[in-house]
Every structure is written in C-alpha cells, then in structure tokens.
Image (cartoon, helix red, strand yellow):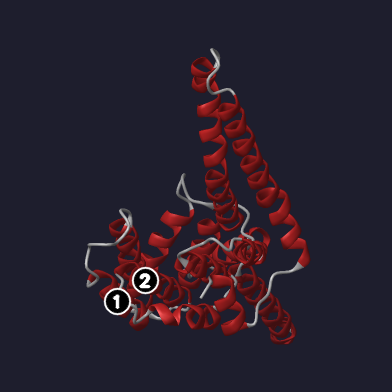
Amino acid sequence: MRAYEHIVEVLGDEADAESREWVRRKYTIRVRVAGVAAFALFVMIMGMSGTPWFAISTFILLPLMIVAVFFGVFMRGSVNKGLTRLIDDDCDPLLCARRTLALLEKDKKNADPRSGLFSYAYALRWQGKWNEAAKLMRDLEDDPDPQSGFLYHSLMAYCAFDKRDLKGLTAEVKALKELPSEGLPKDAPAHIAEHVALRDMLAKELNGKPSKAAAGYIQVADGPKALPAHRVLFSLKAADCLADPAERHARLTYVGEQGGSTWCAAEAKKRLEKESRKKLTDAPADTAASL
C-alpha cells in the first residue's frame, strides 16, 4: 500500500488544493520538463548517428541527457529538503504536513512507503499529535526489517520525550539499541545516541535534578548550531525546570513568539495565559493584605 493511501485509511487526512498546486509548481512541472528534455536529446543523438558530427555531438548531448534524466531524481531530494526546512527553520509543521501529503499523493512511483509515513508522522509529532503519529506508524512495529523498526522506535522516542514519558522513552531507547546493525542507515548510531541523551536529560528532570536538566536543555537551546525548532523545543523544556519566574517567563515568551505552528508555541502561550490569570487573581488578595 502506498504511503498516501495508508494515511487516508488510518487517519482520514487528505491533500488540499493549495498544497497540490505547490507540488505541481515545485515538482511535477520541473520533472516533466526534464523528461521531455531527455527524450529530445536522445532523438537528436540517434538522428545524428552515421554523420561526421555524431562522435563529437555525443560528448556534448549524451552528458546533457544524463543530467536531464537525473534532474528529476534530484528534484525529489530537493523538495524533501525543503519540506524538512519548514520544520527545522520555519517551525511550521502544519504546512510541512500538508505539502508532504500532497507530494505523497502525487509521487506514485515511491516504492518504499516507510520514509513517506515517517515524514508525515514526524510533522504530526511537531504539531503535538502524538497519538495520531503512533497510530500511523504502528504497522512498522512488527516488521522484521530493521529499517522499519528503526523508523518506528525513533518516532516513538521523540513522542515520548515530548510528553515527558521517561518510562516510554527508556523502552524505545532499549528497542533501538537491540536492533541489528545490518540494514540500518549509516547515521543510525548518531540518532540512537541522540535519543540516549534525551533520555538522560529527561531522567534528571523527573528524578529531582531540575537544575541539572535545565542546564542541559539550555545548552542545546542556546547552542550556536541549534536549529530554530530545537531552540523552541528545548527552551520550553528548560522552562519546565527553571525556578526563577522571570527567566521562565522569558523562555516561554520566546517559544510563544518563535514557535510557529509547533505544539511548543501553543503550550507556551497556554502557560503564559495561566500565569497572567494567576497574577490577576493574587493581586486583589495582596492589596487587601497590605491595607
């Protein structure tokens, strides 16, 4: 089953017209142009066969044809990177999910639906739709292919961290470490190490060491190479552990203003509103006490 069909069946989510138009402009038209160019160059080469110019032209036209063919392949990679930047740089997983869904609907030649499912589930995770993301990826849990297990447990580990579920995150880290190394991507060890670090920071937060956890979260959030989405996420995590009200308020304000459509921004705004209501409630009592 294709990734798009699975998403529609499991969650009922479907591509919208605006995102379909974006895919048409950014992907479909360019791939078709590359295909037509490759075919035209092939016809030209064949038409010149047997002529004195054939050998010379082949050195020019044949490389151009190869470039045109592979342009379509590279376009998919370019579009995927653009979708990733919508989360990492723009903090907009909602738009990323919409465009990902439209691309999955259009790309009927995607032989492996797992990467498509993970991409969409990852965008759901950043929207705070953890149950929907887990439901979408559940079919990969029992797949004997290590790649499927890696994608499933990685996604579930991210969701567990977001929800401050130490027990769940520990179980996912254990499952990732037990996967056979054969068949996993080359960067799998780095991703597993990342989940281990997240588990250790969360353990400090929930086991009575909030100041140490805050230091770890702030180190990530304020790191010189931190992506905007990670600055937002770890600033929110740090706010959970900070004792100083002013510093906590500053972190929440930053997340609320910079978090875009991520769940972090919505959560930060909710907490700021709660603190504002609490101040208003406490103010009359303080005034009465002073009188």
- The structure residue drawn at horizontal position 32% and vertical position 57%, both measured from the top left corner, is 185
- 228 to the left or right of 174: right
- Image-quadrant location for residue 219: bottom left
The residue that mark 1 highlights is 144
The residue wearing badge 2 is 148
- Can residue 209 be seen here? The reply is no
Secondary structure, mark 2, is: helix
State the image coordinates of residue 156 (x, y, percent, origin top left). Answer: 42, 76
**Depth check: 50 or 40 in front?**
50
For image coordinates 36% across by 82% down, the residue present is 168
Q: Is residue 265 left or right of residue 130?
A: right
Left of 203 or right of it: where is 46?
right
Residue 16 in the image: state x and y as whole percent: 74, 69
Question: Quadrant of residue 258 in the image?
Answer: bottom right
State left or right for residue 142 relative to residue 15.
left
Q: Is residue 244 above or below residue 219?
A: below
Question: Where 170 sits versus 58, above or below?
Answer: below
* Front in this rendered view, residue 240 or 55: 55
Closer to the camera, 48 or 166?
Answer: 48
The three-letter amino acid code for the residue at tag 2 is Ser
Q: Amino acid at mark 1?
A: Pro
Quadrant in which the C terminus is drawn: bottom right
Q: Confirm or deny contact between disc 1 and disc 2 (CB under 8 A).
A: yes
Residue at x 72% of width, y 62% of height: 19
